[in-house]
Image: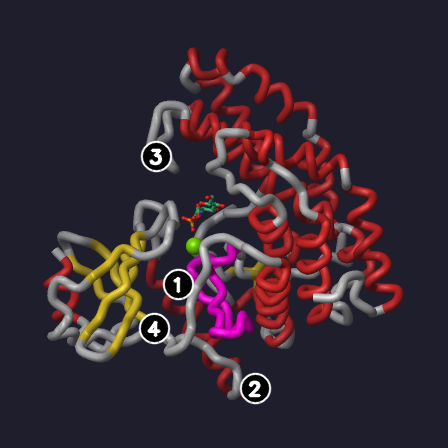
């Protein structure tokens, strides 16, 4: 299948050398060697991204802005096909895009030390900062209502009405926990009406594997701009808190291993606020820990809704997969809420003194 795609991108020496890359749930990614050059090939899931051209458009206009204003910023540009397009469409296999693999860079799948969390947070913060003068509303919406917690909650309620009855019954405890924490969605309603929350260029997928590192664990840039859209900072900070704070991921079945690591929290706060402290309003900063609650809660809702809807969105690798992931996220949420005040204090102290709370 990939042969045809290689040809379309002029990768004539790449035959049979595609290796699956990364662990994303939505798009397929391969690392490819073509002679001495290495590339990343990605198939865009057009069941989810209905307009792949919008992704290419967003990358194009952001790249132009950054090139003009910050020519030194490393921006990984797509490689054009032999038809001079950013995305190659094949009737049979779908939408593909190619990027160069940046020499001496690597991605990581799991955060292993606070420095990595700090660097990643600094890169996501820097990206939003550099684009602060760019009108975020120019970006096309690649996924409608992606981080709209209001809608996610409604979809959950809808699933409770129409979903798999057996699974609803089995999920009673998790459903109860989601309903009990509805105030998290109510706060989001207030944020949407609050002009102190600015609409910014937001990445919307800040997992650690979306940051390129050099060999000295220095962050180089952010990658994977599929979900680059106008949004709130809580999306980016929230997904970092969701995915870097615990030593185990959303896949972990043994919930006793889920933990909130204070030093990783401090690293994220310092990395992000180090870039954006003058850009964020006081109210935004006061919602730093809320960002984590927002994203973890929304992810729990999305996993459970999908489970109740027979795994139509995420699919499942084993029976009960999305049920487990929802339970995992609700445990993470509870552990974060137990430490909420203490963690928010770390942010407040950092803002007051502008000095790191921990040496990283
Ligand atoms: C999906 O495919 P991946 O891992 O990049 C999802 C994210 C979720 C994540 C949970 C487009 O991202 O929102 O947080 O799974 N992306 C989409 O693992 O739905
Ligand atoms: Mg992604």
Label located before the other in sequence (4 or 1): 1
Residue at the spot of label 2: 69
Q: Dot 2: what SS?
A: helix
Position of residue 222 measured from the top left corner of the image (x, y, whole percent): 50, 68
Give the residue at x 60% y 44%.
246
Label located before the other in sequence (1 or 3): 1
Residue 315, which numbered label? 3
Q: Residues within 10 Å of mark 1 (few under 14, many from 20)?
A: many
Q: Residues within 10 Å of mark 4 (few under 14, many from 20)?
A: some
Q: Which residues are magenta?
A: 207-227
Q: Residues within 10 Å of mark 2 (few under 14, many from 20)?
A: few
Q: Disc 4, ligand 2: is the CB inside 8 Å? A: no
Residue at the spot of label 4: 101
Marks 1 and 3, how far apart in space? 23 Å
140 vs 37: above or below: above
Position of residue 276 measured from the top left corner of the image (x, y, whole percent): 71, 69
């Amino acid at each position: 299948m990939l042969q045809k795609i290689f040809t379309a991108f002029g990768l004539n020496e790449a035959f049979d050398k595609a290796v699956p890359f990364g662990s994303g749930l939505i798009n397929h990614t391969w690392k490819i060697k073509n002679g001495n050059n290495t590339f990343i090939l990605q198939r865009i899931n057009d069941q989810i991204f209905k307009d792949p051209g919008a992704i290419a458009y967003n990358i194009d206009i952001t790249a132009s802005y950054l090139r003009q204003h910050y020519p030194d910023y490393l921006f990984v540009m797509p490689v054009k096909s032999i038809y001079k397009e950013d995305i190659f469409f094949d009737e049979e296999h779908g939408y593909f895009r190619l990027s160069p693999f940046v020499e001496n860079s690597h991605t990581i799948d799991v955060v292993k030390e606070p420095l990595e969390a700090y660097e990643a947070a600094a890169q996501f913060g820097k990206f939003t900062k550099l684009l602060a003068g760019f009108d975020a509303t120019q970006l096309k919406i690649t996924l409608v209502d992606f981080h709209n917690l209001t809608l996610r909650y409604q979809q959950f309620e809808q699933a409770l009405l129409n979903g798999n009855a057996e699974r609803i019954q089995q999920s009673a405890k998790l459903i109860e926990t989601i309903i009990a924490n509805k105030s998290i969605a109510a706060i989001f309603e207030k944020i949407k009406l609050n002009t102190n929350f600015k609409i910014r260029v937001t990445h919307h997928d800040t997992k650690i594997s979306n940051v390129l590192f050099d060999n000295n664990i220095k962050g180089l840039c952010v990658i994977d701009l599929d979900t680059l859209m106008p949004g709130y900072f809580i999306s980016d900070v929230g997904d970092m808190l969701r995915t870097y704070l615990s030593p185990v991921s959303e896949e972990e079945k043994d919930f006793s291993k889920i933990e909130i690591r204070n030093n990783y929290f401090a690293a994220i706060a310092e990395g992000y606020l180090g870039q954006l402290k003058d850009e964020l309003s006081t109210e935004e900063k006061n919602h730093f820990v809320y960002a984590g609650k927002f994203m973890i809660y929304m992810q729990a809702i999305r996993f459970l809704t999908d489970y109740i809807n027979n795994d139509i969105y995420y699919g499942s690798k084993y029976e009960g997969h999305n049920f487990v992931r929802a339970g995992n996220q609700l445990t993470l949420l509870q552990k974060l809420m137990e430490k909420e005040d203490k963690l928010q204090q770390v942010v407040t102290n950092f803002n007051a003194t502008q000095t790191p709370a921990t040496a990283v």
